[in-house]
Image: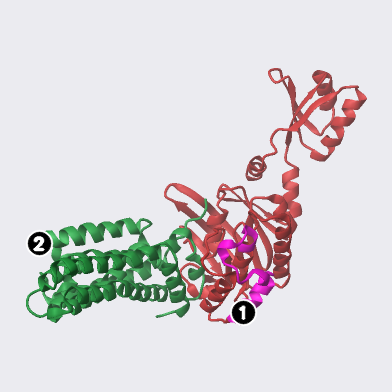
Amino acid sequence: MYDPTVARLTYRALLGRRRALILFSLPVLLIVIASLVRGFTGVDDQVAADVLGGFALATMVPLIGVIAGTGAIGPEIDDGSVVYLLSKPIKRPTIIVTKLIVAIAVTMAFSAIPTFVAGLILNGNGQQVAIAYTVAALVASIAYAALFLLLGTVSKHAVVFGLVYALVWETLFGSLVEGARTLSVQQWSLAVAERVARGDLVSSDVGLPLAVALLTGVTVLATWYAGQKLRTLTLAGEE
Amino acid sequence: MTTIHISHASRWFGNVVAVNDITMSIGPGVTGLLGPNGAGKSTLINMMGGFLAPSTGTVTLDDRPIWRNEEIYQEIGIVPEREAMYDFLTGREFVVANAELHGLGKKAAQRALATVEMEYAQDRKISTYSKGMRQRVKMASALVHDPAVLLLDEPFNGMDPRQRMHLMDLLRRMGADGRTVLFSSHILEEVEQLASHIEVIVAGRHAASGDFRRIRRLMTDRPHRYLVRSDDDRALAAALIADPSTAGIEVDRAEGALLIQAVDFGRFTQLLPRVAKEHGIRLLTVSPSDESLESVFSYLVAA
């Protein structure tokens, strides 16, 4: 279910284009914010949790997920170069799973590592806050990558839809509207993080068993469906 | 024997019928798919390449379905019309990647690069390639696994004459080797130079089929229309209508010209200057009025 050549092409496409600039700049922004906050307010566990929860997990992780997830396949479908993958005796699900693994790895690298570093800067991992949000970022990376990879497979406007989902749904509704929280990758990953952190600095509206079931379900379903879509992908001709 | 069978295949997009009930077989040798732009050539090639399902009918390779059958690509090589191709790789990296996707290695890639004579530029980024170089690297990527069937969509578009000749030589060799080579084009001369067998598609329909002599004859035997101006139109008209190669003459007073319909193209082109000379008439304008490829094709459809 993994093809190293597909993986290599996907990595190079993801890290070699303009998308890479955004991939690098968001983590830098997080670390700058963390340094400034630490400079102005000193060590404060609550503030650390607020920054990591409000910016890192609610905004940065989904944005990185959109860029890596849609970027792993969307541009190839748009410009037609995916034909070089599809005209090979390789199972379509193998192509999707490989691209998913790459998207997950890139999302994790560009979201979880900076989250951990920012946590260390903010309060030196006091009350396990840094580790808790790093775990949340790792878990969320998997679901986001799968969701946005599917989006990149089915829609030409994947980045736009992805941004709307990431910014409007996860950031606004996910934080403000009660009911929407149950259907939010952010909340599911927080449920996992809740177990890791000490005290009540991290909390989720979703129970852990439900969160794990939803995370797994969404990831598996999105990946399966993307594989099906790729099997019947129609390349529009020039006419 | 590797033969693509298209049987009563149609394909529509919404209300638009791109391919309309086409039945044909493409066997070993070089076949040209000829038709004006928008005739449905790409749609047909996409169906043969497994990138489009026929709305009705079937497209098979030796009785195996092509649609949703990844294994078929062990035998098919595809050269798409679109330019996009992982421009951030070098030519060699691109062809090696294609070989690996077939389960082959660097050797196969190098052989394919040698076949298209692209070794000299193989370590340059594809983004720096000219159109002809891109076309050759695309060819190499389609040839890495030594396929029995090669499908090329408008391969000569944008190539200069030297590159065109080079690619034609290559395709001729492939055909002579017993491969099934199909390429599309909207230029008759291109198809005629290369293909031993021609299939003509017009407006989604299968308009004609045969060797190039038959197609050429169909195209030159059709009635030709000429617009002629002279210093004595009526005398010229009277002299021309006496010959059987002229089917009809209309005096267009507004244009101040004769509209002549000729049935025998070869004979008429010799008749006109001779008649003018015999009668001391000066010809001022002789121009074919319907030489566009579209009119040639629409005649073929009606025939």
**Tint of chain A:** green
Q: Residue furthest right?
A: B278
Residue at x 62% of width, y 58% of height: B131
Residue at x 88% of width, y 28% of height: B275
Q: Is residue B280 magenta?
A: no
Give residue B61's mark: none
Q: Is residue B62 visible?
A: no
For label 2, the residue is A178
Residue B47 located left or right of residue A14: right
- On the image, which quarter does residue A123 sit in? bottom left
Range of residues picked out in magenta: B106-134
For label 1, the residue is B108
The answer to whether marks 2 and 1 sit on the same chain is: no
Residue B283 located left or right of residue B133: right
Q: Nearer the viewer, residue A166 or B243?
A: A166
Q: Is residue B126 magenta?
A: yes
Return the x and y of residue B286 as percentages of the image width and height: 78, 30
State the red chain: B
Residue at x 75% of width, y 43% of height: B220
